[in-house]
Image: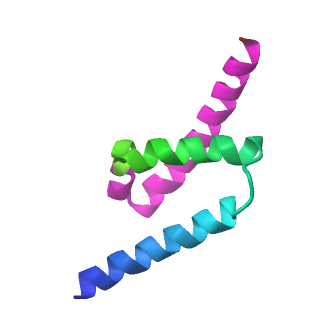
Amino acid sequence: MIAFTLVMSSNQALLEKLEELFGNESFNPIEEELFQWFVFVYSDKGSGIKDLDKLDFEVFKDKLNSLIDAVYLWRHKE
């Protein structure tokens, strides 16, 4: 029962964050891109993130920001 409560709590936190990010309005270009990234992760492609400890997660976030910058510049040049 405790595990179920933690899962429900975790799911609730995700739902609340999605509501905060996307709301009920039509998506603007930023929200559209964020949602596409979320769908990629939601389809279980980013599930390995759960195995990172706090320090590794912080390093991952820093590297992800660098990757996002590189992808943006790469797509901008096309």
Relative horizontal placement of residue 33, taking residue 37 as reference (left or right): right
Q: Residue at x 63, y 46 (%)?
A: 34
38 is within the stretch colored magenta: no
Above or below: residue 69 compared with residue 51: above
Relative horizontal placement of residue 17, taking residue 40 as reference (left or right): right
Measured from the top left, where is residue 73 in percent x and y? 72, 22
Measured from the top left, where is residue 37 in percent x and y? 55, 42
Q: Judge by depth and name the residue closer to the eye, 4 or 57.
A: 4
In magenta, the rendered stretch is: 48-77
Q: Residue at x 35, y 57 (%)?
A: 50
Above or below: residue 60 compared with residue 10: above
* Residue located farthest toward the bottom when viewing the structure as drawn: 1
Magenta stretch: dominant secondary structure: helix
Placement of the C terminus among the 4 image quadrants: top right
Measured from the top left, where is residue 62 in percent x and y? 59, 46
Q: Residue at x 51, y 74 (%)?
A: 13
* Residue located farthest toward the left when viewing the structure as drawn: 1
59 is within the stretch colored magenta: yes
Above or below: residue 59 compared with residue 77: below
Q: Residue at x 38, y 45 (%)?
A: 43
Relative horizontal placement of residue 74, taking residue 16 as reference (left or right): right
* Residue located farthest toward the top when viewing the structure as drawn: 78
- State the count of labels: 0
Measured from the top left, where is residue 10 in percent x and y? 42, 74
Q: Judge by depth and name the residue closer to the eye, 62 or 75.
A: 75
Placement of the N terminus among the 4 image quadrants: bottom left
For the rendered model, the colour scheme is rainbow
